[in-house]
Structures are given as C-alpha cells and as structure tokens.
Amino acid sequence: MSSAALASMAMTSNKTMSQTTKEDNMILLSNATGWPGIETTADHLKNGMYGIDAMIEGINKVEAEPKVRSVGYGGWPNLLGVMEFDGGVMDGSTRQVGAVGALKHTYHAAQVARAVMQKLNHVMVTGDGADRLAAEIGLPKLNTLLENSKEVWLKKVKDLLSAEEFEKFPDIPLVPLNGAITDPEKVRDTTVFMCKDSNQGIHTATSTSGWGWKYPGRLGDSPIAGAGFYADSRYGAAACTHTGEMAIRTSASRTIILAMKLGYSLGDAVKLAVEEVASLEGGFLAGLVIHAIDNKGGHKVVSYNLDKAGKYWLWKPSMSKPELMESEMV
C-alpha cells in the first residue's frame, strides 16, 4: 500500500476517533418535569443539533403539556388569576444570556428567552415587552390559563376572603394574602435542561409558571443567570428548582461554576452551594434542588431540605434512551 493511502487511512481513523470522543462526551440532564420533551432533545443532540436549540425543542413540549403542573399551560396563576411565565437560556461557550419574566400571552418562555439572546442587545425582557417580542418572532397570542387552574384559583380566593372582600376583589390589598403563596399541590418545580453537545458546548435552559398565587410580577430564580441557571463550557452548568428566592440570595448556580473554576470537583462545588443555602436566615426558607454537570460528562443532583429525593432524567450516548434517576438527599 502506498504511503499516500496509509496517510489517508490514518487521517480518516483520527477523524473518526475524534468524532467518537466528542459524541461519547455528550450529556443531557433534566429534572423530572422534563419527561414530555427529554427524548426529543436527546434525539436532536444525537444528530448534532446546537444544544440550546435541542433543549428548546424539548422544553416546548413540556410547556404545552397540561399534566405538568408547574410549567407552561399546566401551571398555576398569580393572586389575580393571571398566568406569568419566566425562563432563561445561556450559551456556555460565549456566556451569552437571554431571559424573560412575567410573560403572559404565550407559555413558550424558553423560546422567547432565546430570542432575547439572539436578537436584542439585552439580557432580560419582562412583562409587556416580553409579550411584544413573542409576537414579533411569530408566536401566537394564547389563552394561557388552563380551565382547571382557573377553577382551583377561584376557589382558593373565595376561601381566603370574606364575602365583603370578595365583592371588592381585586381592588383590595394583596399583601395580607402573602401566606397563600404556595402551589396547591406543593410543587415549585421549574423545568431545567442542561447539556454538553457534539461541539463541546455546555448550555442550559429553564422555563416555569412560577409559584401558584404569587404576588403579581414576582420573578423567581428561573430567569436570573447565576441564580437559577448558569453555564460555562470550560467548567460545566448548573440550575435550580423549587424555592427560587434561596437560589437568588446565594447565586447558587454561579457559585458552583466559580468553585469548579477555582479547582473544586463537581461534588465539592455543589456541596459549597448547599452550605451557602443552609446558612441563610430569615425570609422564606424551604427546599431547593440543585442540578449540575461538569465538562468531563459528570453530573450531580441534590435535594436540600425536602421530604423526599427528587427525580431527574439523564441521557448519554451510551444509553438507548434517557433514564430516570433519583437525587441525593442533603
């Protein structure tokens, strides 16, 4: 065989090995609410799709599934009976971010967040501006309040108020109703996706309808980079679910990535974030679930201050399909 032919075979072999290494190093992780879309995202990643686009294809299905009662169409309204959706995306290779808050007329928050990142010179857009952007990228205006959610909300309001107060509602002070701020099913579970794609980019995306009966305009951690999500392709990605206020107060997701930058292992980085959350005093304190991956294909999911372990989905190229796992209790 000629030297030219041998060289060509070697180049082909090296290319194949390099491609195999990239594919083997991919990873996809989502919390339990990702079930309607996790396989869709995994399939797109297998085919080489850019990580954020692949995750949004999956999250679109989560948002449209009424059986998911903490995200999108199946979520719960604020105290006034109005749906408000939040979401965010982060490209870990460029560290560009897009986020939306209090989006009312479409539940595809992650998709609109991507538009903020790709089309605007901003990082976050909220309220009427977020709805305007959704319309400009072609998303139709939807009735986002599920009929069952409306019925449960109305019953809750009637239970909370006297007949006189209900007659005047909503033209009454809402602050005294602060104690009602909790989901009727005790669920505060944003959907979070994170991945390492075939181009070695580590990215993350979030979407949520937020707490049920929240004060109008409340933003949790889901649209806040560094709190509810963060990605850096050099180190990894992290995202939180449940009590977003705690993740905001400790910059939980950024804490994990910064710790890995400083040389911490993934496990120790997550442990540091948990220690920060555990040190909080005052304010609303409850449970938090932290999800994280590193640039080596490792992952860690922990449930802090909860009655039972959370579930999450994991997919790697060695798996035929995503598998449901159980988080560690801390």
Image (cartoon, grey):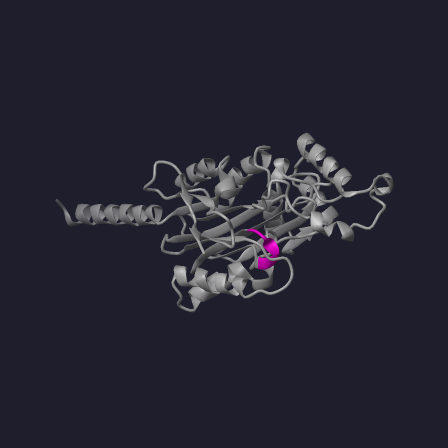
> Residue 72's spot in the image, x, y percent?
61, 39
Q: Which of 328 and 4 is in front in this view?
A: 328
Q: Which residue is drawn at 65% across and 61% down?
A: 283
Q: Residue at x 55, y 37 (%)?
A: 62
**Quarter the C terminus occupies:** bottom left
Q: Would you say 319 lies left or right of 155 here? A: left
Q: Residue at x 46, y 44 (%)?
A: 311
Q: Would you say 15 lies left or right of 89 here? A: left
Q: Which of 40 and 36 is in front in this view?
A: 36
Q: Residue at x 57, y 36 (%)?
A: 68
> Residue 111's spot in the image, x, y percent?
59, 43
Q: Secondary structure of the magenta portion, mostly?
A: helix
**Quarter the N terminus occupies:** top left
Residue 245 counted in the magenta span: yes
Please determine whether, in this image, residue 301 is positioned above or below residue 168. below
| Magenta stretch, residue numbers | 242-246
Tell me how many marks there are. 0
